[in-house]
Image (tube, rainbow, N blue to C red):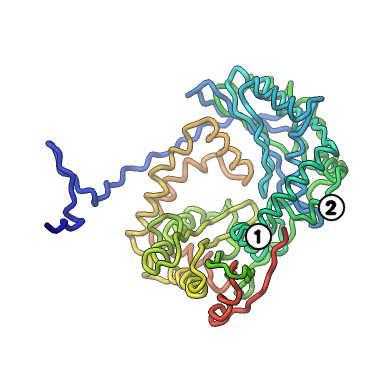
Amino acid sequence: MPWPAPSQWVHETTDVTVNRFTPPAAGTATPVRFPALARDALSNGLAVWTIRHTAAPVVTAVLLIGAGTADDPADRLGLASIAADLSGEGADGDDAIRLADRLGRLGTRLEIGAGPDVTTLGFASLARHFEGALEVLAGVACRPHLALADLARLRDLRLSRLSQLRHSATAVAERAFVHAVFPEHGYGHGSLGTTRGLRSVTIEDVRAWHAGVFRPARAVLIVGGDVVHGSVMRLAHRAFGAWPSGSPGDGDGPTSRGRLTPVSSPRVVLVDRPAAPQSVLRVGHIGPPRASRAYHALIVLNAVLGGQFSSRLNTHLRERRGVTYGARTSLDARRDAGAFACETSVQADATASSIADVLAEFRTVREPGTLTAEEVTRAIRSLTRGYVRGFELASQIVRAAAELAAYGLSDDTFDRFVPEVSAQTVESVRQAAATFVDADQAVAVVVGDSLACRPGLEALGWPIEAFVPEF
């Protein structure tokens, strides 16, 4: 007896027959109403933002410092990141173990990170332990030990990590791509820095960086949860009030981040990995900053091109051609600029043709009549229907507020997301593509077997630059 066709596969119950191949209808997008921000400042210049969220008796706090890895000195790449982590290795007379024990007794731990634009230190705790945890956070931020022995240990760990990453094709592709897109800007290196840069960092460099960067006037304390603003201000004054504001001549703070220089002509950047069966690809170019007025049109465009499983590039390279397990595009929008790129890994013999396919899609979406209402609608639904889930917890709300602070966004940024994304049309998305997506300004990074890939790459007609990224 033959099997029924897939369209006839149904599940029968006593009440209803359900066709498992018919997707459910999309629901209505729930609007976001971001909680009110109470803003204040201490006399030393530290900004304090409070967001009341009483769904659970918990509090999340983040101290955001307005400098990050993009501010690394050119000869000491990795300074911002290692200085941030070193602050958590001891403070106020407690070494790292004692700090962890103090925080453990309060049911929390510190999370410290250095991103391209900001450095953050934070925690999440029960509301009744907020005061104690805030005191630990203040000690780490304002009075770290910054000991030579701790620097030596952290540096050894990072050098080992860099040695490992050198053998990861994905990590190599990322380093090669950001270097190609941001050759003269601080965004052009990895957050961990380089072996040469870390070996150049001295404890004096770390202390000077901390003195120049960790200042109250450069910082925002964001607290969200089961708290009231007046209480937060009182506790913040107790914990951070003695933090000296410093003077312009103190320390070795950030200088120029360098220049943003769009690619004037396309090229292939080839990193040789002999006998590799696959090629890791990054194809893209510089993009607009997070504060761009075209942001909402661009994220819809990104979803159409490669931001979801049913996107154009994934469907073409995975489903039609069968050369990859997946292809995606991303819009990494930062404070000064962003990067727009397609990321995928393909069979070695499909390297050049896959790059050509990606570039063809970059060109196609710019032309009138090539985008359809169906795919734009599908992209809008994928972006808006679950958006509200990102604002359920105090920790999520604090992270969102940190984004406002990091990128200088308005308080209604998240309230406007659903209506502005929903308002995008085929033409508005196409215009964003015509303005910001340009195959003739792209860089194609290939990490793969040079002998296998080069003949096909030469047929693309682009200059080929052999490159070895620095780790």
What is the quadrant of residue 321 in the picture? bottom left
Q: CA distance from mark 2 to mark 1?
A: 20 Å
Q: Please state the horizontal and vertical placement of residue 123, each as a whole percent of the image.
A: 63, 30
The answer to the question of whether label 2 and label 1 lie on touching residues, with beta carbons closer than 8 A, is: no
Q: Please state the horizontal and vertical placement of residue 369, each as a whole percent of the image.
A: 36, 70
Looking at the rendered structure, which numbered label has been put on residue 158? none
Mark 2 = which residue? 200
- Classify residue 325 as left or right of residue 410: left
Q: Quadrant of the C terminus?
A: bottom right
Label 2: how many residues lie within 10 Å, few (<14), some (14-19) or many (20+)?
some
- Among the two numbered marks 2 and 1 on one chain, the one whose residue lies closer to the N terminus: 1
Q: Which residue is at a point 68% across and 56% down the rendered structure image?
A: 187
Q: Which residue is at a point 57% across and 67% down the rendered structure image?
A: 276
Label 1: how many residues lie within 10 Å, few (<14), some (14-19) or many (20+)?
many
Question: In this rendering, is residue 119 above or below 179?
Answer: above
What is the quadrant of residue 289 in the picture? bottom right
> Tag 1, which secondary structure?
helix
Mark 1 = which residue? 175
Q: Nearer the viewer, residue 441 or 410?
A: 441
